[in-house]
Image (spheres, helix red, strand yellow):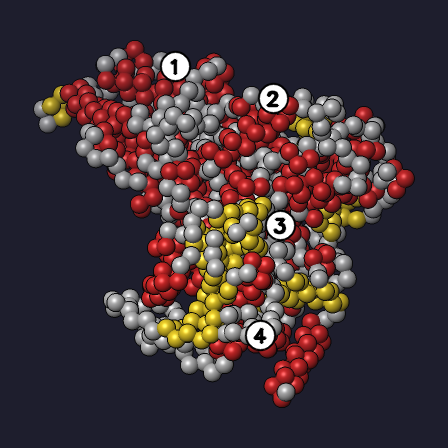
Amino acid sequence: MSPVNTTYFGISGYLIFWVLFAIALGFFIYQMVFLIRLLYLGREVRRFNRPWRRMINTLGEVILQRCSLRSVSKRDLAGIGHALMFWGFGLFVPGYFIFIGLSAGFGLYSHLDGSRLETVYYSILDIAGVCVIAAIIWASLRRYLIRPERLKASPEAGVILGLVFTLMLTYFIAEGFGYASGDIPQFWPPVSTQLARAIESSDMSQEAMETAYRVAWWVHYGVILGFGVYIPRSKHLHILASPFNLLFKSEAPRGTLDMPNIGEMEEVGASQVSGFNRKQLLDLYSCTECGRCHEICPARQSGKQLSPMEQVLNLKHHLISEGAGLLKNSSPGRSFFDETVSEDEIWQCVTCRACQEVCPSNIEHVGRIIDLRRNLTLMKACFPAKIKQFYKNIEENSNPWGKAWVYRYNWALGLNIPALTAKSSFDTIYWAGCLGAYHERPQRTAISLSRILKAADISFAVLGNEEKCCGDAVRRTGNEYLFQQLARQNISTFRKYHVKKIITPCPHCYNVFKNEYPHFGGQYEVVHHTQLIADLIRRGTIPVPEKSLNKSLVYHDPCYLGRYNDIYLDPRQILHSIPGLKLAENNFRTDNSHCCGAGGGGMWMTETGERRISQILFDQVTEKKPEILATACPYCLTMLEDESREKGLQNSLAVMDIVEILQSALPQKTW
Amino acid sequence: MSNHIWVWVETERDEIKKISLEMLSKARELANGADLSVSGIVVDQGLATLSETLFRYGADRVYLVRGGEISPYDTDACVNMIYTLVKESGPGLLLLGATSLGREMAPRLAAKLNAGLISDCVAVKLEKGQLVGNRPIYNGKAHAMVVCQASSFCIATARAGIFDIHESRLRQQVENISFSYQRSEKSKVEFLAYIKGDPQKINLKEAEIIIAFGRGLENVEHIRLIEELADLLGASIGGTRAAVDMKWLPLERQIGITGITVSPRLFISCGISGQYPHAVGMDASDNIIVINNERDAPMFRLASLGVIGSLEKIIPALSRIIKSLKENEERT
């Protein structure tokens, strides 16, 4: 029997069913069309290549719930709850088409009632329903009693939990009364039949049972329709948006920023809706407000204004509230910088990519923040005073220090390292970078490395004074114009000397050469020093470290080496090859590593906020009281060493680059 | 081209500014080689031995301007006055110190007189009757030799501390010309009072002497020692990022890559290890004294004079010596 196949106050159940359906569908379509039209206000972006691969990846992420299960750790199990709810609720969805749409709506119930399909499907739903209820109780306890820091106290989540709970409850009530008012199957579906037996044993009249069944059924149906109306205006828009956000994921290497054709653009970067590309706008719809990025952001942790999630939500609100005017062309739209995002928060990002790494919805935070910076820098000439000096130093002397470019090669004098000339021929160059070339501390790394290379008989040269800043921090502070200029100049120097391979101790230079210079026609074999040395160790072409160091050590993964370029194992292999080193790992390693605060131009700006980002990192990496703090990036090295001095630990804790540690363990006669 | 070299003489309270004597000495040197006369132009504010001093440093003639209401800070009036003087006396060459007033007056005069201007010179000479100035460009990375060719009148400003001061043999004929200038319109500038800048508060970039400290200060109490020394020397106080992070100093006193870049004539570095990000902000200072108890602090590489020892002992000792030197000076 179907609750639709009857009259209510003289009105046909079918009529009520379809009218309600039409109203809900109308609202849903109206809102979705509005939201989709808003996306088209953004700049075009091509993310349609290899569609099959994209689809398979997306299905894997969504159906298998890799997106939420990936983040499950001992500390945070919430991803399991999401997966349970997703799968559980997901199983109900086909039923809505078959048992509500076909069976009730089109009156085909007689074909389905009591069929084997019904028994099997409802048995599955019974189990799923119990799982979903358990997950809802867990989620509610977590959200309202445990209250993890990352969760925003928003009423929306309560509404959704309430709706899903109502759905489950009305499902069981409807099934229980439904079976109780008719024949009760022997065992399957297991939960509903038990409920039905309990109801039957009470002294309820047949009529009351039928009424209860109808009420529960209609409430259930109403909630589903309400859900459809509610979703487009809530954070649960992510249910519809994030699968597409995963589908249109960038396939470029992680360390690549999109390259605007600044010569032909009227407005570079983004100051209003039309400055973002469509994927960046879709990002805004996809946010689940899970707060993972908010929790992990080093700027937020150190008491600064920036929170990637808050920024996304503010931009989403901006897009939707400005959208109607923009679509009607009746208003040019406010600037993001009016009220939506503050300039301070834009400059507080260190581009560590931790937010993007933890985002289950593939929101591209770093690219968005850099587009905002590009607009501030190139269109409004609005940047922190220190960045102005930084640009000027690079423009005049091709290094951020403002030191004469003719001193760049000085570090290598006396080390017997040749600089390339028109007559010399070397395939491989050693690129010290602006820190290695000028700053005494990373210079020691560069010197250690050059000694190891010599010990391994690798013939190499340096560019000498023709080396110019690679442009990493320039690009990440939004000065695309200066970056492209530097990239072209460096590439033409590489071309002049027929450079094929670049070895560098700096993960930032590494990332730029490997992932960004190819856009400008510069294709090289780019090797970070840890990769090179690990390879030499594997092939046995460098002397074996023989001095036992007998020290405990923690290795800090630099963002641009780890999260950006997946180089986690090579540094550890080098450390394992050194006798006596006790490598202690902690929770803050690999892709969960914390930024030192120097990336994204942070090194060249004045840091504000309650704490320094490097203080937080230092506390994390010294948790296990190591005697050596190892890293593989000149930025991290100088930041950590500053912190160590700040704490007065310079005599008990050595902050070293991996090559320096290796060099100290190699026999002296090697060089 | 000329028969006169004019020098604009600046006074500050009861003293002739050193830079004006430098200009005068240089003018004398140029005049001797080309048989020209040197005239000083100065606003008479009742300084007793004013003309005598100027004669002693090379002036043949001193124009004492008595306008009553003209203040040396009123550049409009000073410009008009020099303009009138020069117009009466024909072609020549005018030297001004590249002080804030000199820099303000020189271009206005040049425009008014349709004269050539070579500003901010570190050397000037006369070659075949033409003025040639050497001025640093691109932050001192290159030097431009500028020749003032066409105009009959040339103006040059020069940096302080470049030219030596020479007393010259007194000329037999010196002339004191009182010149009264009545301004035609009301002055836009009103001189209210002279307030001496507190070296501890002025912009560090303008300070001639800077004492900077870093983490090596160890104890916040020691700031008092630094302040005492700074008072005695008339020095400004700055520091490293560490000093700012520890809230020992306000952010605008931070020297280095994320602070400001300074190049005072004397930089006294106390308890600063000399990490590169700090060093790039001060390594262009003329003289650097480093006090640090760590023998291998990188800062010592920049030192003109290095002292290894604790700040606690050295700074009070230094203050004592300077104090007694000052007392001696006052007694004599």
Q: Which label lies toward us, 1 or 4?
A: 4
Q: Residue at x 36, y 19 (%)?
A: A94
Q: Is residue A392 left or right of residue A438?
A: left
Q: Earlier in the sequence, mark 3 or mark 2?
A: 2
Which of the chains bears the disc numbered 2?
A
Q: List x then y, in percent, for residue B297.
A: 73, 59
Mark sitting on residue A639: 3
Above/below status of A657 relative to B243: above
> At x 66% / y 54%, what residue is drawn?
B275
Q: Nearer the viewer, mark 1 or mark 3?
A: 3
Q: Secondary structure at mark 4?
A: loop
Q: Give the numbered dot on residue A523.
A: 2
Classify residue B194 as left or right of residue A463.
left
How far apart are the two marked residues, 3 and 4, measured between alpha carbons? 63 Å
Q: Answer yes or no: is residue A172 visible.
A: no
Q: Identify the mark nearer the N-term, 1 or 3.
A: 1
| Image position of B9 with respect to A551: above or below | below
**Which residue is pictured at 55% across the width and 61% down the height?**
B35
